Image (spheres, rainbow, N blue to C red):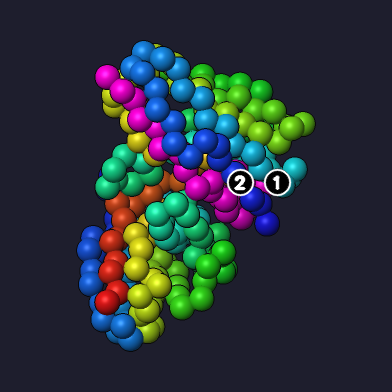
């Protein structure tokens, strides 16, 4: 099993360009998440999808959109990249129970630089 | 929403000594508390977790304790080794949609 696969691993964009970060999991997890990690800020939730067909905003959604394409895939799109979006992006998935939370499995991350 | 705080931000310990990282949370409805280890340039990995119906959980050299009344939980690493050097994140979730709120992380440095 590959777990959670993210592409690309590295990307440099010019201000105003757009791009889509891809994420796929093969663990049959219902829930998927996109986080960004900045120095000293920890992991901040951008968007999440509790189940196939649903998406919700997290703590820092401005400038991003997401698509839960199917149960396996959850993509993050930057429509018009800004330098403030320079960060490391992590996708994660989990399989929560009906009434209990569960740990995340993270992808390997995408290091994005916007110049 | 849930707010998770971690202290101290950086912790240096001599090899073989113990390290303790403490986190506090704000939402009394939170019932799941995982800890993640992140080595430089790598992804965060789950190392241990605890649920609100348990006060302590151990796994070899690591343990987590939970005090629901005070709304804090701690990670204990005994007999530290150089490979324990990493950033450690605590998190909390109130269930439902399983969103985790993460602390800002603690840098642990084990000095050989």
Q: Residues within 10 Å of mark 2 (few under 14, many from 20)?
A: many
User: In the rendered image, is residue A4 in sight?
Assistant: no
Out of B57 and B23, give the one closest to the viewer: B23
* Element assignment for label 2: strand
Question: A86 and B32: which one is in front?
Answer: A86
Q: Nearer the viewer, residue A11 or A74?
A: A11
Residue at 52 percent across and 36 percent down: it is B8
Question: Is residue A18 visible to the viewer in this orientation of the structure?
Answer: yes
Badge 2 vs badge 1, beta-carbon distance below 8 Å: yes
User: Could you tell me residue B44's position as x and y percent?
Assistant: 38, 44
Q: Where in the figure is residue A59, as x and y percent of width and height?
A: 56, 64
Query: Residue A5 sits in which quadrant?
Result: bottom left
Residue B7 falls in image quadrant: top right
Span highlighted in magenta in the image: B92-112
Residue at position x 55%, y 59% in the image: A50
Q: Is residue B105 magenta?
A: yes
In the displayed structure, does residue A53 sit left or right of residue A1? right
Give the camera-side residue of B83 and B12: B12
The disc, 2 or 1, on the residue closer to the chain's N-terminal end is 2
Q: Identify the residue shown where x is 29% and y is 61%.
A: A110
Q: Which residue is mark 2?
A: B4
* Position of the N terminus of chain B by quadrant: bottom right
Residue at image position (45%, 75%) is: A64
Residue A108 shown left or right of residue A104 in the figure = left
Quadrant of the drawing holding the C terminus of chain B: top left
The residue to which callout 1 is attached is B26
């Amino acid at each position: 099993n590959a777990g959670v696969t993210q592409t690309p691993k590295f990307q440099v964009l010019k201000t105003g360009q757009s791009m889509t970060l891809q994420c796929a999991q093969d663990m049959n997890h219902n829930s998927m998440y996109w986080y960004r990690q900045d120095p000293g800020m920890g992991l901040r939730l951008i968007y999440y999808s509790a189940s196939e067909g649903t998406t919700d905003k997290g703590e820092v959604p401005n400038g991003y959109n997401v698509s839960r394409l199917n149960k396996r895939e959850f993509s993050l799109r930057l429509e018009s990249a800004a330098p403030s979006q320079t960060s490391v992006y992590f996708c994660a998935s989990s399989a929560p129970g009906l009434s209990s939370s569960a740990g995340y499995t993270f992808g390997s991350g995408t290091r994005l630089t916007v110049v | 929403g849930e707010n998770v705080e971690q202290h101290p931000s950086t912790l240096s310990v001599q090899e073989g000594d113990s390290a303790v990282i403490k986190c506090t949370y704000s939402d009394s409805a939170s019932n799941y508390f995982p800890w993640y280890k992140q080595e430089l340039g790598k992804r965060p990995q789950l190392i241990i977790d605890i649920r609100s119906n348990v006060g302590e959980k151990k796994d070899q050299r690591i343990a987590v304790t939970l005090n629901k009344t005070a709304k804090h939980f701690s990670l204990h690493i005994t007999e530290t080794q150089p490979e324990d050097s990493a950033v450690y994140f605590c998190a909390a979730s109130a269930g439902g949609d399983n969103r985790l709120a993460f602390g800002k992380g603690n840098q642990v440095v084990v000095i050989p």
